[in-house]
């Protein structure tokens, strides 16, 4: 609705656009975006859980918008060096009221803009005060507004454990960010947070959830589990160490996901690198993370502790190249766990192969028809006894690396600087 | 021989019975260029024959009729031929064939079904409602496949109290939930008087969409591959304007030489 001057009019609880901007811009560096894992049913209110999750939009940075990612407040008493909301940083501050957040969530949700709410906050006044405000907001949303969509809540380190348990009754997922891969880096860059203040509530929630499930109590207790996030590239830890930490978080703490956030310099500080961490490193970490969770790999197999993942080829290719004595495998006979270890063959392709080979002897034509990607796989498989990969083992790595590089290749233009250099012989 | 039919389910199964033994059979519901010397027949729907044919297929594999339903909804030209080849294989082998992915008929049908169900999944996210004065919600859509009636139960499940209309503007029909009943209705054009706050919420959504983006990490190709341009038309956040802005910014700031990931994250 527009007023006499053509300005947009708002009702009382509609959040001011400037406040929304401030609170979103401070929340956007949290990479968690999934809305999967909750099967919450609608019992007369608004919304339900969609177990597979759902993306509602994509921003120009290629990330999905699934949840309304917002802070309750960006007014922080902590002074974490990498964070744009840190106390010593001179940025505009804002705090939203629980009603503003609830109205925004409900109205965005019913227009199908979002799948739910991702509610976080800077540590406003004290950890307990902040956690209480978060819990109050979520309770209001579930109670007065009868909202049954997805809610992801951020845990505030050092908040009282009773508040954490209370939050878990209303949220679908809670996440504590481990922030940095080692206790030393955490001490250096986030002096008010400690390893224990992050890991203890995670373990507490894990135990309480196990008890809740074992006793088959009614209601919900974190149906979508817990996740965490760490910043990559702000501290000197190598990929090997990061992946070992992720592996222990999956296996010991039972997390659903570990997110890796490539470091983006938003504040200047002597203890931080001045350049953005390359996106390719984050990408390789995610690939390795998938190998840990869905492909039966151990971090120890993928790389030694004090090394980084290679950037030129993906982690599965790198593993296969180190273990060439295991290849090629025959697609008509190899069991599922071996097929899953072939570079270029993912979970879906492996299932397709298992299904199709029950009826016929598969050859390369069949695989192509089934849309199994052979660009990488051809060097590591035989189909019907035939091999179409590189004859010389030494050629495989350059071919795989070139395959990745060529994806960004393009026809040279005659007016291109590089083409000009080629014409003049400088290249 | 080309077997023309009117595009209805009954006519398809009648034509199926006739064409089943014809090795070079082509089923078509549209216009088609005939090859030299090629025969063609127009098949009329025969309720009894169609029923018999469906019953036999259901006996062999009840799931295959559900798959046919999805194939028939696809907006692709060749969908009838794909469905025909697939069902013919089912009938010829006398048992379910969906695992035989090395067969052309099966892999084509599987891919076509995947495209339909994938669009259904995408639209669960990309549909955008606007609120009318009466409080009812209205979402215009232009899907490739005819799937609005499959989309309706999803939204009914999450907001059973709110009446809403899913309008397929391409096919001129609407799926309506009035709070108690769900039905399909023909609808060419709709004029919606928007509620007083609608413009305000849309402006807030635009603000949110602009704020949540990280400009220094532009990856426009990925944005387009996850959210194809054909779905942008009814989105209040206007991704094309965001894309233009990101392109301008990229033009002004030189890219670092760091390698970038290909494909999806």
Image (cartoon, coloured by chain):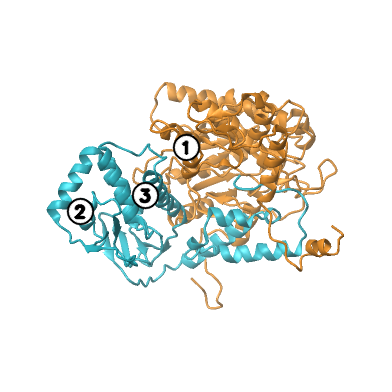
Chain colours: A orange, B cyan
Chain name for mark 2: B
**Marks 3 and 1 in Cβ contact (< 8 Å):** no
Badge 2: few (under 14), some or many (20 or more) residues near its Cα, within 10 Å?
some
Instruction: Answer with left or right where residue A214 lies relative to residue A24.
Output: left
Chain name for mark 3: B
Look at mark 1 in the image and give the residue it sits on: A37
Residue ID at (39%, 24%): A216
Q: CA distance from mark 2 to mark 1?
A: 48 Å
Chain name for mark 1: A
Look at mark 2 in the image and give the residue it sits on: B18
The residue at the far right in this view is A426
Res A283 quadrant in image:
top right
SS at circle 2: helix
Instruction: Answer with left or right where residue A198 lies relative to residue B116.
Output: right
* Marks 2/3 same chain: yes
Residue ID at (74%, 29%): A182
Residue ID at (20%, 51%): B17
As drawn, B136 above or below A94? below
Look at mark 3 in the image and give the residue it sits on: B154
Of the two numbered discs 2 and 1 in the rendering, the one whose residue sits closer to the viewer: 2
Q: CA distance from mark 3 to mark 1?
A: 17 Å
Res A187 quadrant in image:
top right
SS at circle 1: loop
Q: Between A283 and A85, which is closer to the camera in this rendering? A: A283
* Marks 3/1 same chain: no
The residue at the far left in this view is B48
Q: CA distance from mark 2 to mark 3?
A: 38 Å
**Marks 2 and 1 in Cβ contact (< 8 Å):** no
Q: Between A134 and B59, which is closer to the camera in this rendering? A: B59
Residue A261 spot, x, y in % from top left:
67, 42
């Amino acid at each position: 609705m527009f007023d006499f001057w053509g300005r947009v009019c708002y009702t009382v609880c509609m959040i001011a656009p400037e406040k929304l901007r401030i609170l979103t811009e401070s929340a956007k560096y949290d990479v968690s975006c999934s809305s999967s894992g909750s099967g919450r049913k609608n019992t007369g209110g608004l919304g339900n859980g969609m177990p597979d999750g759902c993306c509602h939009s994509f921003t120009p940075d290629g990330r999905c918008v699934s949840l309304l990612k917002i802070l309750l407040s960006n007014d922080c008493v902590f002074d974490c060096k990498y964070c744009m909301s840190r106390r010593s940083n001179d940025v505009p501050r804002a705090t939203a009221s629980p009603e503003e957040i609830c109205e925004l969530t409900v109205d965005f949700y019913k227009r199908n803009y979002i799948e739910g709410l991702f509610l976080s906050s800077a540590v406003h006044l004290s950890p307990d005060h902040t956690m209480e405000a978060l819990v109050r907001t979520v309770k209001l949303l579930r109670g007065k507004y009868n909202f049954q969509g997805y809610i992801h809540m951020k845990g505030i380190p050092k908040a009282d454990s009773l508040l954490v348990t209370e939050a878990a009754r209303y949220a679908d997922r809670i996440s504590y960010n481990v922030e940095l891969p080692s206790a030393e880096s955490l001490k250096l860059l986030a002096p008010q947070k400690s390893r224990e203040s992050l890991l203890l509530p995670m373990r507490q929630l894990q135990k309480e959830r196990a008890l809740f499930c074992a006793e088959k109590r009614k209601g919900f207790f974190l149906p979508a589990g817990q996740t965490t996030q760490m910043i990559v590239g702000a501290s000197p830890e190598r990929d090997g160490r990061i992946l070992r930490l992720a592996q222990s978080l999956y296996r010991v703490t039972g997390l659903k996901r570990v997110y890796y956030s490539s470091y983006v310099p938003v504040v200047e500080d002597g203890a931080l690198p001045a350049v953005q961490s390359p996106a390719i490193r984050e990408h390789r970490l995610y690939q390795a993370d998938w190998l840990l969770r869905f492909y039966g790999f151990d971090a120890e197999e993928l790389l030694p502790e004090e090394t980084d993942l290679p950037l030129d080829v993906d982690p599965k290719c790198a593993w296969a190249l180190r273990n060439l004595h295991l290849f090629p495998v025959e697609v008509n006979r190899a069991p599922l766990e071996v097929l899953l270890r072939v570079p270029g063959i993912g979970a879906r392709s492996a299932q397709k192969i298992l299904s199709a080979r029950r009826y016929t002897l598969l050859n390369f034509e069949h695989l192509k028809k089934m849309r199994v990607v052979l660009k990488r796989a051809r060097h590591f498989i035989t189909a019907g006894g035939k091999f179409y990969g590189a004859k010389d083992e030494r050629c495989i790595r350059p071919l795989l690396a070139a395959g990745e590089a060529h994806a960004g290749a393009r026809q040279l233009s005659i007016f291109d600087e590089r083409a000009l250099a080629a014409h003049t012989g400088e290249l | 021989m080309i077997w023309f039919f009117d595009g209805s389910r009954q006519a398809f199964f009648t034509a199926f019975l006739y064409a089943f033994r014809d090795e070079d059979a082509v089923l078509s519901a549209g216009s088609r260029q005939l090859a030299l010397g090629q025969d063609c027949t127009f098949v009329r729907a025969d309720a009894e024959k169609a029923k018999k044919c469906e019953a036999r297929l259901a006996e062999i594999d009840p799931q295959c009729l559900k798959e046919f339903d999805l194939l028939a909804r696809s907006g692709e030209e060749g969908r009838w031929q794909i469905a025909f080849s697939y069902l013919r294989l089912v009938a010829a082998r006398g048992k379910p064939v969906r695992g035989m992915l090395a067969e052309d008929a099966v892999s084509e049908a599987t891919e076509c079904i995947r495209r339909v169900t994938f669009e259904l999944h995408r639209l669960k996210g990309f549909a955008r409602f606007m609120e009318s004065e009466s409080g009812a919600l209205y979402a215009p859509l232009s899907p490739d496949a005819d799937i609005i009636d499959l989309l309706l139960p999803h939204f009914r499940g999450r907001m059973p109290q709110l009446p809403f209309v899913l309008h397929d503007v391409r096919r001129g029909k609407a799926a309506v939930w009035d709070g108690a009943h769900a039905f399909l209705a023909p609808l060419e054009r709709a004029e919606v008087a928007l509620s007083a706050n609608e413009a305000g919420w849309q402006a807030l959504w635009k603000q949110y969409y602009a704020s949540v983006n990280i400009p220094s990490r532009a990856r426009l190709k990925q944005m387009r591959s996850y959210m194809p341009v054909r779905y942008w038309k009814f989105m209040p956040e206007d991704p094309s304007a965001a894309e233009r802005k990101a392109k301008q910014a990229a033009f002004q700031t030189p890219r670092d030489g760091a390698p970038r990931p290909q494909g999806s994250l």
